[in-house]
């Protein structure tokens, strides 16, 4: 993971920690026609998956992070 992705990851994790538990079940974006909830995004980002890179970039593009 490069420096920019690591920075996005840290921003995401800070934002995620402030989100109420009931909101974490809500869809935050759609990736390849698949709905991604905050919880799913968290698991992907936490595990440094390939999908997490796309999620972080989409969240940045949506100005969520």
Image: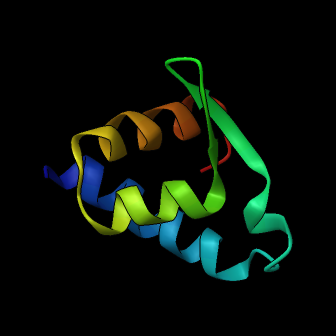
The residue that appears at 45% across and 40% down in the rendered structure is: 55
Residue drawn at the location 37% of the way across and 33% of the way down:
54
| Front in this rendered view, residue 57 or 22 | 22
Quarter of the image where one finds residue 10: bottom left
Question: Is the residue 32 above or below the residue 43 in the image?
Answer: above
Q: Relative to residue 26, is residue 18 depicted above or below?
A: below
Residue in the image at 76% along x and 74% along y? 19
User: With 18 as the anchor, is 36 left or right in this view?
Assistant: left
Q: Tell me what residue is drawn at x 55 percent, y 76 percent.
A: 14
- Residue 15, position in %: x, y? 63, 69
Question: Where 63 sits versus 46, above or below?
Answer: above
Which residue extends farthest left?
1
Q: Quadrant of the rendered structure where residue 30 is?
A: top right
Does residue 43 sit above or below 14 in this rendering?
above
x and y percent of residue 26 in the render?
79, 53
Camera-side residue of 2 and 26: 26
Which of 24/62 is in front?
A: 24
Q: Percent from the top left, x then y, of residue 58?
A: 52, 31
């Amino acid at each position: 993971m490069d420096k920019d992705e690591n920075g996005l990851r840290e921003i995401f994790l800070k934002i995620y920690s402030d989100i109420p538990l009931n909101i974490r079940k809500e869809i935050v974006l759609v990736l390849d026609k698949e709905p991604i909830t905050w919880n799913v995004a968290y698991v992907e980002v936490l595990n440094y998956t390939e999908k997490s890179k796309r999620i972080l970039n989409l969240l940045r593009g949506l100005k969520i992070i």
